């Protein structure tokens, strides 16, 4: 099962901060996930990329990251490879 397509969008977390929600399309179906901005995952800290456009949400927006950066990284991989780097 490989990732066929990614659709990411800017949403707001429960604090009102911009964050990313992602739809992941595979041969097995559609999966959706969102992570609040600044969420700590311990030693596996998430990578937070902000637009730094001070005219949008004090530079905390994520619209530039949405589809281009995320899709370029993961389309064609298996979902398990995202975390482990293991082959499909």
Image (cartoon, helix red, strand yellow):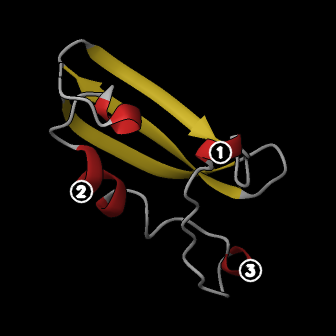
Q: Is the N terminus in the top left, top right, bottom left or bottom right quadrant?
A: top left
Name the residue nearer the viewer: 29 or 85: 85
Q: Quadrant of residue 85?
A: top left
Q: Is the C terminus in the top left, top right, bottom left or bottom right quadrant?
A: top left
Circle 2 SS class: helix
Residue 8 image offset from top left, x and y in percent: 41, 48
Say above or below: 62 vs 37.
below
Locate residue 21 relative to residue 78 in the image: left or right: right
Q: Quadrant of residue 80?
A: top left
- Direction right: furthest residue: 15
Residue denoted by label 2: 72
Mark 3: give few (<14), some (14-19) or many (20+) Cα within 10 Å. few
First in sequence: mark 2 vs mark 3: 3
Real-space CA distance between mark 2 and mark 3, rounded to the nearest whole angstrom:
26 Å
Observer-side mark, 1 or 2, equals: 1
Real-space CA distance between mark 1 and mark 2, rounded to the nearest whole angstrom:
24 Å
Residue 58 bears which disc, if any? 3
Observer-side mark, 2 or 3, equals: 2
Q: How many marks?
A: 3
Real-space CA distance between mark 1 and mark 3, rounded to the nearest whole angstrom:
28 Å
């Amino acid at each position: 099962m490989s990732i066929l397509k990614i659709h990411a969008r800017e949403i707001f977390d429960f604090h009102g901060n911009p964050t990313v929600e992602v739809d992941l399309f595979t041969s097995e179906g559609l999966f959706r996930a969102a992570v609040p901005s600044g969420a700590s995952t311990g030693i596996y800290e998430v990578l937070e990329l902000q637009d730094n456009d001070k005219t949008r949400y004090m530079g905390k927006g994520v619209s530039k990251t949405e589809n281009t950066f995320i899709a370029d990284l993961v389309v064609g991989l298996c979902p398990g490879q995202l975390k482990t780097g293991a082959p499909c």
